[in-house]
Image (cartoon, rainbow, N blue to C red):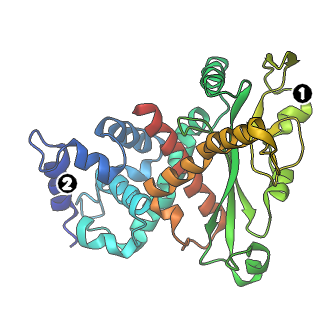
Amino acid sequence: DRRAADRHLCLLQQYFGPKPVYDSSAFRKRFRMTQRLFTKVLIAVVETDDYFEQKADATGKLGISSLLKVTASLRQLAYASAAHALDENLEIAETTALKCLKRFCRAIIARFGSAYLRSPTPSELQEILQENARRGFVGMIGSVDCMHWQWRNCPTALAGQHKGKEKKPSKILEAVADYNLRIWHCNFGSPGSLNGINVLDQSPLFQDFLQGTAPRVEFMISGKPYDTPYLLADGIYPEWLVFVKPIEKPHGLKQKHFVKRQETCRKDVERCFGVLQARWRLIDTPCRLWRADAMAHVMHACIILHNMIIEDE
């Protein structure tokens, strides 16, 4: 008997009662989000996947509550907790905790993916353009870069193609982020042996530009009109109109100032990666999952929750 009912009541007293043991700042630190957003996520996950509903077993005894299942999922994402370690505090077995994590991520994607994994709307695009124009980059819609997630349990047959310069198997996340650290594009799953150009060749990011369906943004630079927005990128990216890269060997104060400003604003996506990994420690530690699709579900769920937290706050 794992006393799940007792643990459920204890969790209610600690965080959700009229006089909780821990205040809102402690809740925000441990659940990575406000109680308001947590409640929204909890209700949505239960509505999306009935696995998270509290059900009775064959003897009529109620099983693990929805609150415990969602809490176990978030603890694994936030702290990279081993599934078996949750048994001490949440009274949930290792296999159940892992099942909660995988189904939680799929439920988050199914319920919130269309709203929080998408391109900006016209009004949102104008806000991004105005903010970047204020920073000195008229026509910029974000910064692009890649991040690796080490795959500890990569199958031996796939290890070679997933090993990059770090000599350890990994998967690559390509993302575009804005000043507020909101992620507007993500492409996850390329093997770690690839570089930025190879990832770009496989990415759907620029299909809209190639097909002529990308949003048109009219702006002027040095008296010359442009109608294609651009991204800040590092030096490895190709010489395309949609990339603004640092000058390799700047001459004079004007070029040096440009390089400094470009590198400063390009840090948006690097700051975003830092916050994403600090918020969800699971994607900052070698992945113990065996399947690539499970890794993708975890990564996409973390990005969706990251964007939801930014919007909520």
Describe the element under mark 1 as helix, strand or loop.
Answer: loop
Q: In this rendered view, identify the residue nearer to me: 126 or 10.
A: 126
Report x, y in % for residue 225: 87, 16
**Where in the figure is residue 186, as x and y percent of width and height?**
67, 46
Q: Amino acid at mark 2?
A: Leu
Find residue 38 and report its image quarter. Answer: top left
Image: 244 above or below 172: above
Residue for badge 1: 212
Mark 2 or 1: in front is 1
Looking at the image, residue 65 sits to the left or right of residue 280; the answer is left
Q: Secondary structure at mark 2?
A: helix
Residue 11's label in the rendered image is: 2
Which of these two is toward me, 306 or 153?
306
Q: Quadrant of the N terminus?
A: bottom left
Q: Amino acid at mark 1?
A: Gly
- Identity of the residue drawn at 69% across and 40% down: 262
For the residue carrying disc 2, how many other residues have a C-alpha within 10 Å: few (<14), some (14-19), or many (20+)? some
In this rendered view, identify the residue nearer to me: 253 or 299: 253
Residue at image x 29%, y 72%?
87
User: Is residue 184 something that shows in the picture?
Assistant: no
